[in-house]
Amino acid sequence: MKNAIRLLTTICLVVAALFGAALPVQAKVRVVTTLTDLADFTREVGKDLVDVRSLATGVEDTHGVPMKPSFVPVLNRADLVVLVGFDCEHAFLPALLEASKNPRIQVGHQGYVDCARNIVPVDVPKTTDHSGGDVHPYGNPHYMLDPVLAETAVKEICEALVAFDPKDRAVFERNRDTYLAELDTKIVAWREKMKPLKGLQFVSYHEHWPYFADRFGLRYVGTIELKPGIDPTPRHIEELISMMKADHVPLVVREPQFPEKVPRLIAEKAGAKLVTLPIMPGGVAQTDTYIEMMDYIVSTMVDAVGK
């Protein structure tokens, strides 16, 4: 009897092992994001259930990520493409989507995830005349530098993952809630750390910072660029320096996508501090995640003005 039971047990174990081996490994959701902050959010929500690729590495101009041939097959296989929206990616994404020949991720389809869907933009132009520079007809697209608005993007990504893979809804939503709780805690800490800078005036190279300034109570008073995407003229530089001296503007922000020479000159002549701040994860060393990037931005600004 014992031998029969042992034999039956052995048979059951073998069958179970064979059946288990025959089960296919669950395919991951293939997600392509335009920028690195979106890739970080997707990994936080999807964890082991997603395979994420960002077109940007963090050091590029968000409006001009180079269109590499290798992007096309990646997009061709993608289940979802996640973007900032507000025309931020207009210079590279539409052409890549067309070349991908992937119907799932075209505009208007389920796999096209526009994270700006529920964002109210600032700086919506009254005209789309491009004599005003690289005009964004739908408003300033750099809302991701406001961590409260970034949470909206996290929610959009979770919703898209659930729509594509509803059986794992509970996992995605649990991961989303865990990450948002962590981000909420960090937002409280960042606001507290930025309190001494309330009302601080600063200029930057490109108009990346209005949402950030609004969130943390700063005054964003100008850009080194003459107009979006248009390099400064000598006259504009002199006028900017004069304004900064008259208004005692203490800080110049240079994004790593732009050369340092002109921002440094302006800072020196205006008697201001110069800081280099990333606009997406990976823009400078040790900012691989969104939280690390925001930690870096807040600490760098506070340290610069406090010295």
Image (cartoon, rainbow, N blue to C red):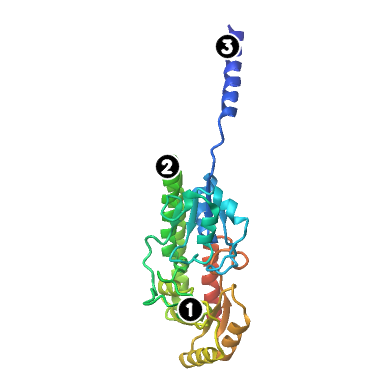
Q: Nearer the viewer, residue 55 or 191?
A: 55
* Residue 235 located left or right of residue 149: right
Closer to the camera: disc 1 or disc 2? 1
Helix, strand or loop for disc 3: helix
Residue 81 is situated, as x and y percent measured from the top left of the image, at 49, 54
**Quadrant of the rendering where the N terminus is positioned:** top right
Question: Disc 2 marks which residue?
Answer: 166
Q: Earlier in the sequence, mark 3 or mark 1?
A: 3
Residue 78 is situated, as x and y percent measured from the top left of the image, at 53, 49
- The Cα atoms of the two marked residues, 2 and 3, are separated by 42 Å
Q: Disc 3 vs disc 1: Cβ atoms closer than 8 Å?
A: no
Q: Is residue 239 above or below residue 10?
A: below
Q: What crowding class fits label 2: few (fewer than 14 Cα within 10 Å), some (14-19), or many (20 or more)?
A: few
Q: Which mark is residue 5?
A: 3
Residue ID at (62%, 57%): 69
Q: Is residue 139 above or below residue 53?
A: below
Kindly identify the amino acid type of the residue bearing the numbered disc 1.
Answer: Gly
Q: Earlier in the sequence, mark 2 or mark 3?
A: 3
Residue 302 is situated, as x and y percent measured from the top left of the image, at 52, 76
Q: Quadrant of residue 155?
A: bottom left
Q: Which mark is residue 214?
A: none
Helix, strand or loop for disc 1: loop
Closer to the camera: disc 3 or disc 1? 1
- The Cα atoms of the two marked residues, 3 and 1, are separated by 81 Å
Kindly identify the amino acid type of the residue bearing the numbered disc 2.
Answer: Pro
Q: Is residue 212 above or below residue 22?
A: below
Question: Disc 1 marks which residue?
Answer: 133
Residue 109 is situated, as x and y percent measured from the top left of the image, at 42, 51
- The Cα atoms of the two marked residues, 1 and 2, are separated by 43 Å
